[in-house]
Amino acid sequence: MSEEPEQSLRNSIRESNENDQQAIRRLHLEAFGEPEGASVSQLAIDLLADETARPVLSLVAEKGAAVVGHVIFSSVRVAGNACAVVYIMAPLAVAADLQKTGIGTALIQRGLELLGERAAQVVLVLGDPNYYSRAGFHAGHDLEPPYDLEYPEAWMALELQPGALAGIHGVVRCADSLHSPELW
């Protein structure tokens, strides 16, 4: 991808607002399809209203006036590490007809940049290692998920501050909206 389209993608990303909620719901429904889309779209809306997710960073990508991508980064607590500034990225969606065009990657990169500016130390994700490793996420860290995972290699972390993972270990406590075994 050339520099110009990447800049264009970056320029189409902004923080979401209350007026975006229905577009965000529709996007997740469409991107994930049935039956998963209903629960993922509800999760996105619930996280936006969840006080235990604060602070939260919600970004949308637009094409024209349409919301075509969305990602949420919500804060988590790590048992025994009260000062750690850690976020989890979930959910991420891109319109079905625009997947594999760089929108998801652009949303992730912009989110990581903004979180870095806000002194975040680590970002976590539960997802496809083949996809998220391209953004620098990796397994093999000492942050434990809140529930046992069928695919532990999908539980990945990314340091926003060099060496941050060396000093943080323990069980992660997510926002109430994410703290449900069926989501893991």
Image (tube, helix red, strand yellow):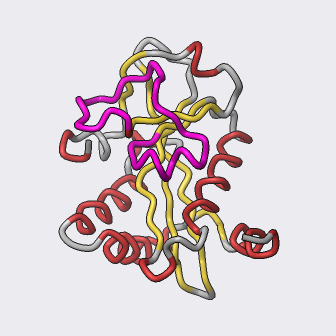
Up/down of 125 relative to 59, above or below: above
Q: Nearer the viewer, residue 129 or 145?
A: 129
Q: Residue at x 56, y 68 (%)?
A: 60
Q: Is residue 168 above or below residue 39?
A: above
Left or right: where 146 falls relative to 137:
left
Instruction: Give the quarter of the image for residue 126.
Output: top left
Instruction: Name the foreground residue: 9 vs 41.
Output: 9
Relative side of 119 to 94, left or right = right
Looking at the image, the residue that sits furthest to the right is 3
In what quadrant of the picture does the C terminus appear? top left
Residue 177: percent from left, percent from top: 30, 46
Query: Percent position (x, y) of residue 112?
Result: 64, 46
Magenta stretch containing residue 81, yes or no? no
Find the residue positioned furthest to the bottom.
Answer: 64
From the viewer's perspective, is residue 72 above or below residue 76?
Answer: below
Would you say residue 134 sits in the magenta stretch?
yes
**Residue 43 horizontal/vertical position (percent):** 31, 57
Instruction: Indicate whether 62 appears above or below 13.
Output: below
Q: Nearer the viewer, residue 124 or 55?
A: 124
Q: What residue do we see at 68% from left, 74% from top?
A: 12
Q: In the image shown, does 31 or 41 lie closer to the viewer?
A: 31
Q: Give the percent coordinates (x, y) of residue 172.
A: 38, 26
Magenta segment: 125-153
Q: Residue at x 81, y 74 (%)?
A: 4
* Quadrant in which the N terminus appears: bottom right
Identified at 59% across, 15% down, the residue is 166
Marks counted in the figure total 0
